[in-house]
Image (tube, rainbow, N blue to C red):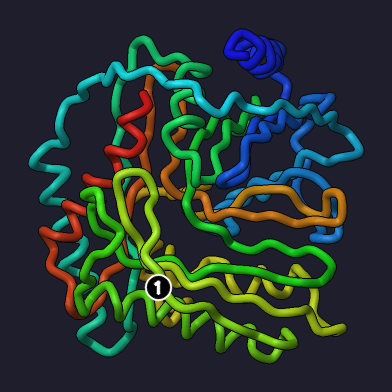
Amino acid sequence: MQKQLAIFLEKAVHAHKLKKPFVVYKKPNENQLVFFAQHDSTLYELISFNDSGFVFCPFSEKDKSIIFPSSKSSIDFFEIPPNANSSQEIKQFKNTSFAEKKKHLTLVEKGIDFIATGAAEKVVLSRKEEVIAPSFNMLATFYNMLYKYHNAFVYLWYHPKIGMWMGATPERLLTVKNNRIKTVALAGTQLYKGDLNVAWGKKELQEQQFVTAYIVSHLNNELYHLTQSKTETVQAGNLLHLKTVITGTLKPNCSIRKVIRLLHPTPAVCGLPKQQAFNFILQNEGYDRQYYSGFLGVLNLNEETYLSVNLRCMKIEDNKVSIFVGGGVTKDSIPVDEWEETVSKSKIIKHVL
């Protein structure tokens, strides 16, 4: 079975050599691997959420929203062997520099000061960490992701005019099937130490409540039978998060496009109020997030839409890997703790390189 998986993934190697757009992905807790390959190298921008295909959308509208149209693509499937082991060899990368740490601490302190003025309740601040991986192997890295992060949306995406991205994101933006919508509020972070029965601090509980309340209030007028689950602790790699599932049925005058516009960027990747936090991020982070904290997935394919937030991801340029990590800042944030959270998140990606 492992040989068959390697043969299946060679489709990605072949498409990459031909500079043809493709994505290989699997949904959380599923064993079906999907290879979605565009027939030509055209860069198709997403114009309408009534279109069908695989979409890759940025954090900010200044970058292009891309679609691999289903009408111009082919799709193949493969059942991943359930009991295989991924490579256990861990490459040790150089620790982040003091200058990088100081820069992020200063950014977080600035965010806390911004919140103290009453301009926002929460702002999500991130950083980009670049590592050199001289022997980077696309398939080996993706293979490791598949087996280490079974409960994540795992993907390898490529377009010759945009580049290569890879990730294992724990967060769903939304799913839609038969007008039934499901989304999640995911916030709060702590290290997983072998037990899901953990205590959460005031800052993390408040952060989770911010995200849940925002989603519920913005969807309340757009959905019938809006319900939310009890908040639970879930594992994502070596981290734990707080998660609440929110469901409902689309009202006749509401569209997928409208729901996406209401949700994206969510308070889990941007902040509250959304516009004030968004402006602060663009003015102060000091780099372009591009597709980090955007969203990706299938749109109107086989009567289903499944979109994930692009977290725990990296951009690959030859042997340089850019890792994107961040965290939610509130009035109760402690800058050094926020820094350590980004370090923990970066290890998720480094663990598979």
Front position in the image: 345 or 77: 77
| Picture residue at 45% right of the left edge, 49% below the top | 311
Q: Is residue 159 above or below residue 283?
A: above
- Residue 173 in percent (x, y) is at 59, 62
- Residue 149 in percent (x, y) is at 45, 39
| Apparent side of residue 181 relative to residue 333 in the rendered image (left or right) | right
Identify the residue at the far left of this view: 98
Identify the residue at the far right of this view: 71
Confirm whether residue 284 shows in the render: no
Front position in the image: 278 or 21: 21
| Picture residue at 49% right of the left edge, 82% below the top | 214
- Residue 178 in percent (x, y) is at 84, 67
| Picture residue at 58% right of the left edge, 72% below the top | 263
Mark 1, residue position: 271
| Picture residue at 54% right of the left edge, 38% below the top | 154
Q: Is residue 328 above or below residue 9?
A: below
* Amino acid residing under circle 1: Gly
The C terminus - image quarter: top left
The N terminus - image quarter: top right
